[in-house]
Image (spheres, rainbow, N blue to C red):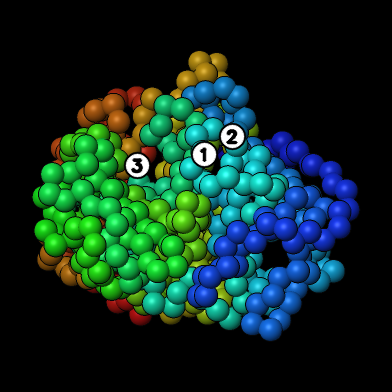
Amino acid sequence: MIRIGLVAIAFSIIIGCRQKPLDTRGNIVMNEPGWPLMFELNQGESQVLKIKNRSWRFRLDTIVYQFQPDFRNKPTEIYYQAFAHVSINGNSHNIMMKPYQLPQQKEGLKVLLEMTKEWANFGNTDTLGRMTRDARFAVVLEEDSWGPAELRFPIQNYRWRSSAYQNTWFSLVPTSKTVYFHKGDDFGAIPDTFEVIAPFKGKVTTSPYPHGDGKSNSLIIENDLGFKVRFGHMNIKYILPQIQEGLEVVPGSELGRTGSTWNGRRSQYADPHLHTAIYYKNMRLNTYAYWTEAYLRDYPEPVLPQAGGYYFTIPGRPLELDGSGTIVKDNGKSASPSWLLTNGEKINAWKVQEAYQKPGFYAEEFIVKTDNGRIFKDIAQVRVFDPDSLSQVGFSGWIHHFPVRDIKPGDQVVFWLRDWLGKPMVVNFGDTQKWEHFAEETSHVYTEEGVYTVTAVPTDTTSATIKTIVYVGQPDL
């Protein structure tokens, strides 16, 4: 792997537009108190937005797409991100859509490009709710929260990016054998460990209790405005007996535990996680911004590192590793970023351009340091396909641990490691130079405070690395 200069990272398609008259018929698709205003526009079309006695004229001009390779299916170039070129009150702006993208502040608004019709019609994306126009946007006032201010993060005692397995809104799912963009947020966790709670006040409308639903044990809560949250994969043994249809819940009500149920049984060997989805009536919503703001209210960490999740490329093709989605509560004035790469390079930047020279599965470490010496880390997972065989890299995996918060020196930390081919692995827990064989479950005791990078690699010649981060004795503030 070598570092190279800035180059174009993907092909782009620019769709032209014609200026169209203002059309307000059916553009607004969601307008409920306390939630974002959501609307759809064709290219060249405008909409007057009215929020709390203020108004904006919002026009969609063009949409630009960037692509990434995926050799599990044809076509091999699939969507990675979209840019909507818009005009707000006559001023031009670019609004981005990609995995882990938060709303952008523009003209006194927070603006999110929820989805484009072209992307939504690609692959297995039929449950979004029918789009009638080219793009769907959501907005709130710059000073308002994204969704209700009482919205809770759905997992108790969780830690941001504490699992090497996580998926978000329209991230390409690495475990699927076909092109599948994720519709919601997955939070990796050792099964039956973390408490799952109700994020808002509502009524249980679907419950798998007491015998399970034969699928993923869907649990759905709906409020009076028609908003629903759906949880998936909890094991029936750990769903509370009272969580049955008709039960009224409030924010923070305990529902059960994270689990591993799929196809009616504990079968998530490769990726145990809590699946979360938010709907307005029959329309799916981008969950990432809701859960991020809820997490910031529930947990006090000053930095939420975000290395970008999963990346896909081929040998020699430039790839941009992007940590700019990191949240720093003082607007970044006290944080400095760096990347520690698997080739040994350390690069001080939010974004890094890389080219990998051979197929494999790479775990790239992203580090954010505050001016008072606090360290926060995340891992970018890079899958480099072999274009000659047109097949996916034959290796991937994750590490989970428990607990993930309030770990003190001397505490026992339980680790689960899975690779998807059952290869023998060795692990280094980050506190010594020692490598040891890793069974499916093991435990480790850290004797000193610190932020530790746990690294696992196969014992054969497979080019692969799995990493996760453990915080020991670190204060939340």
Asked where in the image residue 470 lies, by quadrant, the reply is bottom left
Q: Is residue 320 visible?
A: no
Question: In the displayed structure, would residue 117 be above or below residue 387?
Answer: below
The tag on residue 466 is 3
Task: Give me the residue at 68% from left, 57% from top.
Answer: 26
Q: Is residue 210 left or right of residue 405?
A: left
Name the N-terminal-most of marks 1 and 3: 1
Q: What residue does disc 1 label?
A: 125
User: Residue 57: horizontal and vertical position, in percent?
Assistant: 78, 69
Crowding at mark 1 (Cα within 10 Å: few <14, some 14-19, many 20+)? some
Closer to us: 298 or 331: 298
Q: What residue does disc 2 label?
A: 122
Mark 2 against mark 3, which lies toward the viewer? 2
Name the N-terminal-most of marks 2 and 3: 2
User: Residue 85: horizontal and vertical position, in percent?
Assistant: 77, 55
Amino acid on which disc 2 is placed: Phe
Q: CA distance from mark 1 to mark 2?
A: 7 Å
